[in-house]
């Protein structure tokens, strides 16, 4: 924010030129790097799904009227939070879509 040279009011104070803020390593904390993404994808490919993830996948395949809600409730019980449950549901839906695409291609 540029200063306007006045003693009172918004943007008050001595007129200065604003310098760009330096990006610190802590500001990219939690971002997914290329190496970690590669490692995780390889591990997922080799190890596969855990039993509760297989159960969620089965719920997706069988479907039903309130499948999304049931999947959410099940995932929330296992993972402990709303956000994690939604994320897991989307992840398993992507896995299901990939499996279906692989079957359609083969």
Image (cartoon, rainbow, N blue to C red):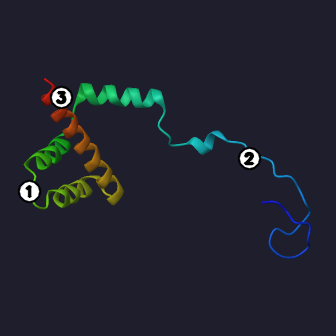
Q: Few, some or many C-alpha atoms within 10 Å of disc 3 (few <14, some 14-19, many ≥20)?
A: few
Residue located at (92% from left, 66% from top): 5
Quickly name the residue at label 2.
21
CA gap, disc 2 to disc 3? 47 Å
Horizontal and vertical percent position of residue 105: 16, 26
Tell me which corner region of the image, top left, top right, bottom left or bottom right, holds residue 14.
bottom right
Asked whether disc 2 touches disc 3, contact meaning CB atoms under 8 Å apart, the reply is no
- Nearer the observer, 104 or 57: 104
Q: Secondary structure at mark 2?
A: loop
Residue 84 position (above or below residue 91): below
Residue located at (26% from left, 57% from top): 76
Horizontal and vertical percent position of residue 13: 89, 66
Horizontal and vertical percent position of residue 7: 91, 73
Quickly name the residue at label 1.
64
Residue 75 position (above or below residue 100): below
- Nearer the observer, 27 or 16: 16
Q: Is residue 100 left or right of residue 5?
A: left
Residue 7 position (above or below residue 89): below
Horizontal and vertical percent position of residue 75: 23, 53
Tell me which corner region of the image, top left, top right, bottom left or bottom right, holds residue 4.
bottom right
- Nearer the observer, 67 or 6: 6
CA gap, disc 1 to disc 2? 52 Å
Sequence-earlier tag: 1 or 3: 1
Q: Which mark is residue 102?
A: 3
Q: Secondary structure at mark 3?
A: helix
Residue located at (12% from left, 50% from top): 59
Q: Few, some or many C-alpha atoms within 10 Å of disc 2 (few <14, some 14-19, many ≥20)?
A: few
Sequence-earlier tag: 2 or 3: 2
Residue located at (14% from left, 57% from top): 67
Q: Secondary structure at mark 1?
A: loop
Q: Is residue 23 left or right of residue 102?
A: right
């Amino acid at each position: 924010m540029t200063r306007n040279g006045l003693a009172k009011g918004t943007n008050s104070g001595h007129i200065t030129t604003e310098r760009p803020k330096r990006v610190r390593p802590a500001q990219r904390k939690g971002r997914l790097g290329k190496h970690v993404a590669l490692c995780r994808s390889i591990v997922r490919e080799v190890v596969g799904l855990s039993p509760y993830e297989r159960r969620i996948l089965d719920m997706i395949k069988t479907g039903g009227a309130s499948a999304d809600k049931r999947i959410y409730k099940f995932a929330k019980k296992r993972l402990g939070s709303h956000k994690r449950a939604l994320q897991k549901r989307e992840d398993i839906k992507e896995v299901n879509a990939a499996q279906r695409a692989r079957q359609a291609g083969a």
